[in-house]
Amino acid sequence: MAASNLPLDGDRLWADIMDLAALTEPDRPYTRRSFTPLFLQGRDLVAKRFAEAGLTVRIDAAGNMIGRLEGANPSLGVIAVGSHSDTVPAGGRFDGIAGLATALEVVRALRDQGVRLDHTIEVVDFLAEEPSEYGLSCIGSRGMAGVLEPSMLEMTEPGGETLRTALRRVGGDPDRLAEARRSDIKAFLELHIEQGIVLESQGLDVGIVTSLVGIRRMEIVFEGAADHAGTTPMHLRQDALVAGARTAASVRAIAEQLAGEGQGYFVATVGIFNVEPGASNIVPGRCRLVIDARSTNPVLSARFVEAIEQESAAHAAAVRVRRVPIATLSDSKPVICDETVRAAMHQGARDLGLNSTDLASGAGHDAGFMSRICKSAMVFVPCKGGKSHVPEEWSDREQIAAGAAVILQAVKALDKTLS
Ligand code: HGY
Ligand code: MN
Ligand code: MN
């Protein structure tokens, strides 16, 4: 559908996305990691756009930036729309940002049409949706859902700063996290690029998300003995990297087996693999890996954890290194998206003459944590080649505008039906 026929300004929406994309580490596009000065620059830009759109702007105790426009009947509570402005390292311009810009455009379009909702509307830039340097993802939406636990605040980034300190740096307040938990939000809607190939390959305009996978992130550390690479005979080595590499191979093998059983979606990845001291002529004394395992079926996840426990211990013993007890960095359960919000999204697509389909999400999103406190659902738009978390990530202006219009239609409909 041409963006010109849509009830919002697709060019204005696109400009917000491109303006944020310009705020990247120059040598590693597109990178705007949470908690960094660049991230805060991005927030300043977004806060300005929020204010220009007539929103009052605040940072809640969990570090979320929230733009708010009171409704005609504030006692009805809040309809929230949003996503995240942080990126993965060398990621794309649309993951999170397209959803945040959409939320802002919804508010502007309502204003342009002279529509004042009965519900209050809030636009939310959730803090650190991507796995942060502290090891935790969805920090802000966990906070809004009341599950950002005190123990998580003690997680540290490689330089030793705690999440507690970092949260203060971005305007949050770790001592008042209880205030971040919301009970007045009636519905949450999020637009996101699909980060997969279904919509593009089937020529579909939007996907209405049915469920989100559960995600478990585990850290495994092997401690051996650093030694001279030239003078240490093979049988005397305690090479931590060998245990780590064999464990990474086990992750792949176990995941392929579980995925092939037809008992539900299962994937697992080793995306972080550190070796110390990290010199060509030193036998590695320490190896750290982080596993990201995802499934729609908790039984498969539990079987994966059990198998990795056993195989990583065996790999450590085989090369006489110690495996530190496996640390669970995070463990989010699978989420079923709300039927009422999904129906409003499908109806919005039909009203706009767009074709929509139901679609499960293999990616995690803030909408997952928001489902703990309100009716929550998502609209996916196609992304080129299904690629995401890479600089080539792309979605067309018209595709994003169409998805944003579905969100707009759904917000207007829910404003009437939720009350
Ligand atoms: O990793 C994810 O699933 C999301 O893109 N943060
Ligand atoms: Mn992402
Ligand atoms: Mn995202």
Image (cartoon, rainbow, N blue to C red):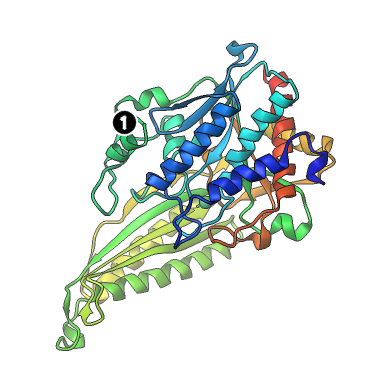
What residue is rendered at 20% in x and 74% in y? 320
Depth check: give the residue in front, 25 or 365: 25
What residue is rendered at 69% in x and 46% in y? 400
**Residue marked by disc 1:** 174
Task: Say whether residue 229 is visible.
Answer: yes
Q: Where is residue 54 in the image (x, y as percent from the top left)?
A: 59, 23
Task: Say whether residue 374 is visible.
Answer: no
In the rendered image, the vertical position of residue 198 relative to residue 356, given as above or below? below
Q: How many marks?
A: 1
Q: Where is residue 80 in the image (x, y as percent from the top left)?
A: 58, 28
Q: Disc 1 residue type? A: Pro
Q: Where is residue 299 in the image (x, y as percent from the top left)?
A: 49, 51
Depth check: give the residue in front, 52 or 71: 52
In the rendered image, the vertical position of residue 86 relative to residue 113, given as above or below? below
Depth check: give the residue in front, 341 or 312: 341
What residue is rendered at 43% in x and 26% in y? 181
What residue is rendered at 54% in x and 46% in y? 20
- Number of residues whose C-alpha sits closer than 10 Å to that of mark 1, classed few (under 14), some (14–19) or many (20 or more): many
In the rendered image, the vertical position of residue 58 relative to residue 74, given as above or below? below
Q: State left or right for residue 218 relative to residue 392.
A: left
SS class of the residue under badge 1? helix
Q: Position of residue 129 (x, y in %)?
A: 47, 44
